[in-house]
Image (cartoon, rainbow, N blue to C red):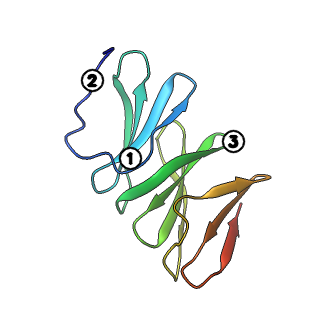
Amino acid sequence: MLWTRDLRDRISTGILALGDALYLGAGEGEVYRLNQTTGVVEARLIVAGATFGPPIPVGDSLIVLAGERSMICIDRTLSAVRWRQGLLDGLSSSRPYVWRGTVLAGTEKGELLAFR
């Protein structure tokens, strides 16, 4: 074992390894960036709503599903939420998908949503 880190709550998303960092969501709305080598928490951002699905990289941002009806875009430094898109219907996608720089997600009503 190289290291362990207690985040004091369950990990609620997949874990994204990107560069020297690990990104993940935990608890009821926290997103973390940890150093891959040491496990040190380099940044933490509190967002409204529990996060789920894996964080998805898009350019210098991450897309994360938050709450039952929300998608957020955060910068990789975890200093701010760039945008939040509320959704009228619940998501049926287990995660957002990226196609040619566009973020795609499906709804429970069978709609396909696209965001830039």
Query: Vertically, is 60 above or below 89?
Result: above
Residue positioned 22% across, 32% down in the render = 6
Q: Which mark is residue 25?
A: 1
- Give the left or right position of residue 70, taking residue 25 as reference: right
The residue type indicated by label 3 comes to: Gly
User: Disc 2 vs disc 1: which is toward the camera?
Assistant: 2
User: For mark 3, what is the residue?
Assistant: 59
Q: Are marks 3 and 2 in contact (CB under 8 Å)?
A: no
User: Disc 3 vs disc 2: which is toward the camera?
Assistant: 2
Please identify the residue farthest to the bottom as the structure is shown: 109
Please identify the residue farthest to the front as the structure is shown: 1
Crowd tier of the residue under label 2, counting other residues whose Cα lies within 10 Å: few below 14, some 14–19, many 20 or above: few
Mark 1 or 3 closer to N-term?
1
Q: CA distance from mark 2 to mark 1?
A: 16 Å
User: For mark 2, what is the residue?
Assistant: 4
Mark 3 or 2 closer to N-term?
2
Q: CA distance from mark 3 to mark 2?
A: 29 Å
